[in-house]
Image (cartoon, helix red, strand yellow):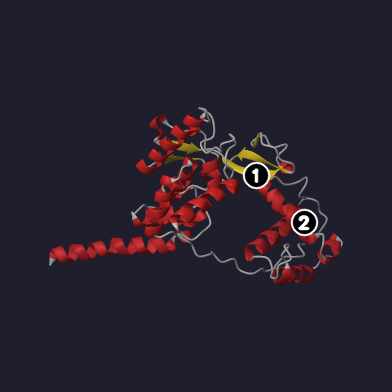
Amino acid sequence: WHMDYIKVRPSTHSNYDTYIERHIYNSRLGSIPLKKLCLDDFVTFFRAKEVSGRLDKKPGGLAPKTLRNMRNMLSEALEFAINNLRWLEWNPMAGLKTPKVTIPKIQVYTERHQDRIEMAALQHENKNALLVLIDLYTGLRIGELCALSWSDFGPGREYFDISFILERLSKKWTKDRSEYRQIPIAGAVTALYLGPPKTESGRRRIHMSEQAISAFHDIERQQRSLGLYKPNGFVFRQENGNPYEPSSYRNLYRDVLCRANVDYQKFHTLRHTFATRAFELDFDIPTLAEILGHAQKSTTENMYGHSLDDSKRRNMAKFNRRMDRAV
């Protein structure tokens, strides 16, 4: 089923490789003939993974989201065995429940910390540090920013189009996928690829504030001074000419936080901070969802409900001022 019958993103294929080869095959579940599988077999398997399923030998089990993804993969494969191959009459894992996935609390930099982070990025000798500031004013995913090339920009650098993401993927699952373009950087099992956004809504135009426009001009000037600028080249390039990929850029991000004397939060916190500031400035949900590239407006509302509540309170308070004028 995995090798021949489905087509998902290469990163999803890699996750399935891990689920199948390192979890299922090495368990009792993996030794049971297909037609002898029953619900109890799956209940036992998932309970064990919930308690002690980590592959790094550390104590503890798999996260609820991982358990859910593994359950969905198994169920889809079994449904294929039933409906397409006619190997089974019913799904032996039907009705299986895994732990509920809870949305983690959104981490956001305070305005005071944001000011310090912006100043540290502006003062950094490596102008690629300005990617941090740019993200605070655009809310992009790191793979989207790393994929940017100068040809993606409109006149005057006032906007740019998101058409790709840059990510390291398994060569096994990308070799026959024409929508993925390999970047010529040495690698054995994995390689760096420009590929399509995860959803069609990920393709979007980003209009920028003056802070972001100025930052891109600074990056361009430094590239030209170092002889790295190419009209169709990557915006964020290392001194050896290679593009920054998400994993390598995180070291520069840590350095910016260190110089700003701000405790480390994962890079995605910049995106959350942008969305929170946008709500504080009364952005409407459809506009913000489009900027963030969310396929569903409900995703934006669910993720940033705390900020939305603040916005509602501010707007409702406007009625108080109206009543005061009436009195």
Quarter of image, res 20: bottom right
Left or right: where 132 falls relative to 79? left
Point out residue 274 in the picture as x, y percentages from the top left corner: 42, 52
Q: Which residue is labeled 1 in the image?
A: 168
The answer to whether residue 79 is visible is no
* Residue 249, above or below 156: below
The quadrant of the image that shows the C terminus is: bottom left
Left or right: where 166 falls relative to 71? left
Instruction: Give the label on residue 58, or none.
Output: none
Q: Amino acid at mark 2?
A: Ile
Dot placed on the residue nearer the N-terminal end, 2 or 1: 2
Element type at mark 1: strand
Quarter of image, res 116: bottom left
Point out residue 134 in the picture as x, y percentages from the top left corner: 44, 45
Instruction: Give the label on residue 20, or none.
Output: 2
Q: Nearer the viewer, mark 2 or mark 1?
A: 1
Point out residue 280 in the picture as x, y percentages from the top left corner: 35, 57
Which of these two is toward me, 233 or 257?
Answer: 257
Residue at 37%, 59% (x, y): give it.
Answer: 112
Element type at mark 2: helix
Residue at 45%, 50% (x, y): give it.
Answer: 289
Q: CA distance from mark 2 to mark 1?
A: 21 Å
Which of these two is toward me, 308 or 7?
Answer: 308
Q: Amino acid at mark 1?
A: Arg
Which of these two is toward me, 298 or 235?
Answer: 235
The answer to whether residue 239 is visible is yes
* Residue 227, above or below 10: above
Confirm or deny contact between disc 2 and disc 1 (CB under 8 A).
no
